[in-house]
Structure formats: C-alpha cells, structure tokens
Image (cartoon, rainbow, N blue to C red):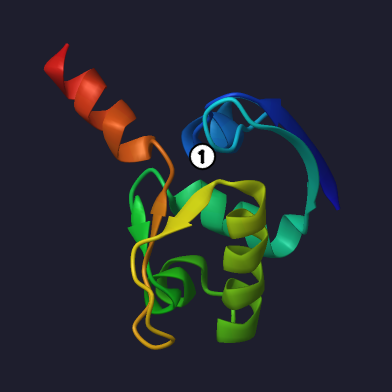
Amino acid sequence: MLLLTGTGYGTAHRAAGHSRCVGGASGSSYTTTLDANAAWGLIKILPAHPIITAAVGVATTGRTKPAVSNGISELLNAGILTPLTTSPRNRAWEAAGLLDLIEELESG
C-alpha cells in the first residue's frame, strides 16, 4: 500500500511522476491509501489516456478487468479520477485537471 496525502487541486500527472501528494477537489484536504498494484498502473498511463474506460485500462496496463476496476475505484476515492458518465455500463472517467494542464502546456 502507498500513502498519498494532499491539499488543494492536484493532478494524476504529478502523482505519477513527480510527487506522492495529490489533491482532490479545489480546497479539499485528505489522506488516502492506494493499492500500488492496481492504482499506480493506471496512474502511469493517465498522461497518455486522460479519459479512461475499463477496457482502455485493461489494454494499456495488461491487468485484469477486476484489478482495473479496483484501481479505478481507488483513484475515484482519492479524487484523481472523476466520472464522465452516470450509466452502470460503458463508464468513462477523466483524470481530474489533466486535460487543463495539457491545454495550458500546449498554449505556452
């Protein structure tokens, strides 16, 4: 297990490569524990796939669907992913703030 703590607005990009601190919604503060096997595999692919589905997670990490589902749940609870769909099928999630960060970097 890996302990992550954070205050304020954070991104999966920072968590994946640069810091153990990740933030949830703006102004929030929390401490959470992530299963390193499930969640970190997904965090590593989020910069290339800022919008993710379970199928994309399975294909890109090589993990099983149950492991990817557990990782997605952990990242949801940590505030790293936010749901884009509400139906129980064909669900998709966005890496919180990652698309904004990419857009900011591209605009200079």
- Residue 59: x and y in percent read 41, 75
Q: Residue at x 57, y 65 (%)?
A: 72
Q: Which residue: 33% across, 48% down?
A: 48
Farthest residue to the left: give it. 107
Query: What residue is at 42 percent from the left and 67 percent from the top?
Result: 60
Q: Is residue 46 left or right of residue 22?
A: left
> Which residue sits furthest bottom?
89
Q: Foreground: 12 or 84?
A: 84
Q: What kind of element bears circle 1? A: helix
Left or right: 57, with 42 as reference point: left
Of the pair 17 and 100, the residue shown nearer to us: 100
Residue projecting furthest to the front: 27
Quarter of the picture holding the C terminus: top left
Mark 1, Cα crowd under 10 Å, few <14 / some 14-19 / many 20+, is many
Q: Label 1, on which residue?
A: 12
Whether residue 20 is visible, yes or no, is: no
Q: Amino acid at mark 1?
A: Ala
92 to 44, vertically: above or below: below
Tell me if I can see residue 22 in this picture.
yes
